[in-house]
Amino acid sequence: MRHAWILAACSIAIAGCVTKPPRPDQLRQPPADRLLAFQSPTDGDATIVVTRDVGMSGSGCYGAIFIDGKVAAKVATGERATFHVPAGEHIVGTWNTGSGLCGYREGKDRREVSTILKPGDEKRFRITINPNSGVEITPTTL
């Protein structure tokens, strides 16, 4: 019976590490000092929107958002950042950033996806953290 309680407690702890999309009332924009690039729209641009999940896993670190290898923003959990980029192919990526353990191997294990945008297009991505696969960035409709 004791083993069943330990197994149940571990299952709950692991399940608590999975992040989930923020509810509309949890969603906010990062402050201007953490929006670092691609903030000024121009004619013919496309839009990339990146939302970071909520949850305990990774919540002590900012998630850096990279566009074409450049840090475009640093987002906390429940934040959504919008970027204006020229039409064409772009690489969108993420990894934890900051001091201490947050900066451990910063940028070395970056997760990236490729996207092709036409003028006026908007593509959305979601930053998640899963105990099995770690930090991920994936296309989303959210």
Image: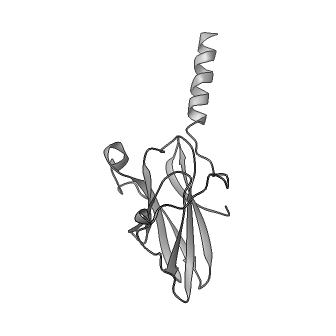
Q: Is residue 65 above or below residue 6?
A: below
Left or right, 70 with respect to 31, comes to left
Residue nearer the viewer, 124 or 138: 124
**x then y, percent, for residue 43:** 54, 89
Within the image, what quadrant is residue 47 found in?
bottom right
Q: Quadrant of the C terminus?
A: bottom right
**x then y, percent, for residue 33:** 40, 64
Write the residue at 51% across / 46% down: 133
Q: Is residue 5 above or below residue 31?
A: above
**x then y, percent, for residue 65:** 45, 62
Write the residue at 60% across / 35% down: 15
**x then y, percent, for residue 56:** 53, 40
Q: Is residue 7 above or below residue 80?
A: above
Q: Quadrant of the N terminus?
A: top right
Residue nearer the viewer, 90 or 26: 26
Write the residue at 61% across / 29% down: 12
